[in-house]
Amino acid sequence: MRMVDLIEKKVQGLELTEEEIKYIVDEFVNGDMPDYQMSAFMMAVVFNGMTEKETADLTMAMMYSGDIIDLSDIKGIKVDKHSTGGVGDTTTLVVAPLVAACGGSVAKMSGRGLGHTGGTLDKLESIPGVNIEQPMERFKEIVNNIGVAVIGQTGNLVPADKKMYALRDVTGTVGSIPLIATSIMSKKLAAGSDAIVLDVKTGSGAFMQTVEDAQKLAHLMVQIGQLVNRQCVAVITDMNQPLGMAIGNALEVREAVELLSGKIEKGDPLYEVCMLLGTHMLILSKIATSEEEARKKLEEALYSGAGLKKLQQMIAAEGGDASYICLERIDELCNVRRKLEIYPSEKGYISSIRAERIGTAAQMLGAGRATKEDKIDPAVGLVMNKRLGDEVSPDTPLCTMYVNDDTALEAAINTFRSAIEISQNKPEYRPMIYDIVRE
Ligand code: URA
Ligand code: CA
């Protein structure tokens, strides 16, 4: 086989065989194929797409490029969730313990944040003592004992994606739906769970800017999962504003603790998306047979405090000081040199929020990384005071910034301001949940 022939085949829009796709991935991962050939191939995919069969074959070839996690030592159905990147998305810290409190098994490997989206691992590490690097045996033991563990990736999972993503990032080939689907699903399948709930974000702060594109990505990922006998459901949710009010690591842990303490009302976007994800995780785990039953179980786990207790147990099992994980003490993790309120310059309604810019503003304050080497300040970030559609005036703050280092403060304030648009008319209602994709 010659790579140039396979590139030409894709340029002509012909379907590649399983062997051909496997050849491409293997040669690239082995270092036997130059980056320029892989780049040319991926660019051809951007323009000509891939068939469902090609997409599934590529996912499998990528998945088998490294270690596959075997979770069979964990009893019951193992369920995982994945969000396609959101700002203020603290769902894992809420929904994983809630599902465990309902009897589910959540064995989750999570990632770090880069750019404007925060990573669950960075949030967990804002709690003193937490060690997200747990050996595989200990990871499984924690899930068997308490029903939930969220740790960093162990082993060499999907090296093909690491290499391909680095190349996509610098060749304008990130935004291809089949390439995104294969990238996400190869990693989720290699991580070993039996059932996966996918949260595909759509809107200004998301990879998928339109609901139609989000639906295409969702269908493709669910189909890939089903081809290898994993139960998959995708939900499509709004990312036209940050999901929660907090953006920053300890600040998001605090919001998760508030939610798990019953302090966040039904109807709140973070609350509703957590319930939605939890509902489908319980159904796929065969713990509930209907959405009503699942929601009832989740609410019982929430309002009885069982979910918060699971989060405390998980933190303790990973070496963390769980005494912070309560309303009485969580503020201690959010101590900063100063808090700064940002006010609007005019009266009106918030008509648009560029979620990714809110994330960037928090990153500039030190809550996120611009490069992999950057160090995070766990306490800093910002807390929104207003949501899309809210009425505002110059005497009520839009947000509170939590600041330790002033170096980029002015840039953060300007970026935050540029994210918020105020109009004189109340904007149209926008749904939080657009679709549920099961096949
Ligand atoms: N997230 C991923 O893991 N891969 C993509 O390609 C896009 C989002
Ligand atoms: Ca995330």
Image (cartoon, rainbow, N blue to C red):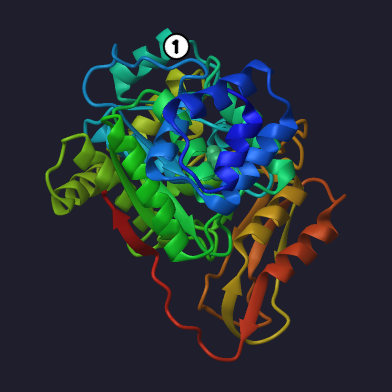
Asked if residue 408 lies left or right of residue 14, the reply is: right
Q: Is residue 272 visible?
A: yes
| Image x and y of residue 240, in percent | 53, 66
Query: Is residue 131 placed above or below 223 in the rendered structure?
Result: above
> How crowded is the residue under tag 1: few (<14 C-alpha within 10 Å), some, or many (20+)?
some
| Image x and y of residue 106, in percent | 34, 29
Query: Which quadrant of the frame does ligand 1 lie within?
Result: top right
Q: In which quarter of the image is residue 190?
A: top left
| Image x and y of residue 299, in percent | 24, 49
Q: Quadrant of residue 298?
A: top left
Tell me the residue that label 1 is attached to.
136
Residue at the extreme right: 407
Amino acid residing under circle 1: Met
Does mark 1 have its CB less than 8 Å from ligand 1?
no
| Image x and y of residue 246, in percent | 56, 54
Q: The N terminus is located in which quarter? A: top right
Query: Is residue 427 placed above or below 301 in the rendered structure?
Result: below
Asked if residue 249 lies left or right of residue 143, the reply is: right
Q: Which residue is drawn at 52% across and 73% down?
A: 388
Q: Which residue is drawn at 43% across and 28% down?
A: 18
Q: In the structure shown, which secondary structural element does the residue marked by tag 1 occupy?
A: helix
Q: Residue at x 54, y 91 (%)?
A: 425
